Amino acid sequence: MGDMGDLYRDWGAGKKAMRDKHGVDCPQCRAKQPKRTPTILLPGQRCKVDGCRDPRPRVSDEEFEAVTGWSVTRSTKRRADRGRRNSAD
C-alpha cells in the first residue's frame, strides 16, 4: 500500500487502541436510548448525540504516545509560543 494508505491504517489502529484502553460508554446514551449502542467517550470528550461530557482529565501526551506509538506535537502549543514571541517584540 502507498504511504498515505499506511498512514491512515496506522491512524485508525491508534484510535482503536485509545478507545480500547480509555473509552467508556456514555451514561446519557445508555439512559435515554437503551436500545442504541452507546457512544464510546475518551477522557474529556463530548458526546455528539446528547451533549454529555466525560469528566475525566484528558490523556497526557506521554500516555497517548505509549498507547498509539505516535509522536505528539500539538499545533496549539506552537501557536501559543509563536504568540508569546510576537508580543515580546
Image (spheres, grey):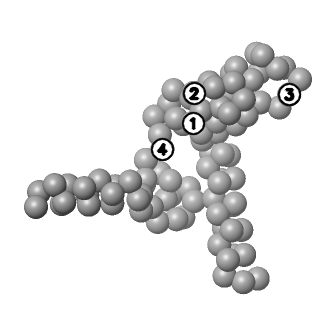
Image vertical order of residue 65 relative to residue 45, above or below: below
Could you tell me the amino acid type at mark 3?
Arg
Residue at the spot 10% in from the left edge and 61% down from the top edge: 89
Q: Are marks 2 and 1 in contact (CB under 8 Å)?
A: yes
Where disc 2 sits, the SS reads loop
Q: CA distance from mark 2 to mark 1?
A: 6 Å
User: Please, is residue 83 above or below residue 4 in the view?
Assistant: above
Which residue: 68% across, 46% down?
Answer: 20
Q: Is residue 25 left or right of residue 60?
A: right
Q: Which mark is residue 53?
A: 2
Q: Earlier in the sequence, mark 3 or mark 4?
A: 3
Q: Return the disc, 4 or 2, that comes first in the chain's sequence.
A: 2
Q: Residues within 10 Å of mark 3 (few under 14, many from 20)?
A: few
> Can you say which quadrant of the picture contains the N terminus?
bottom right
Distance of label 3 from label 2 (alpha carbons): 18 Å
Q: Residue at x 89, y 23 (%)?
A: 35
Q: Which residue is mark 1?
A: 45
Neighbour tally class for label 2: few under 14, some 14-19, many 20 plus, Cα within 10 Å: some
Q: Read off the residue under disc 3.
A: 36
Which residue is nearer to you in this view: 53 or 59?
A: 53
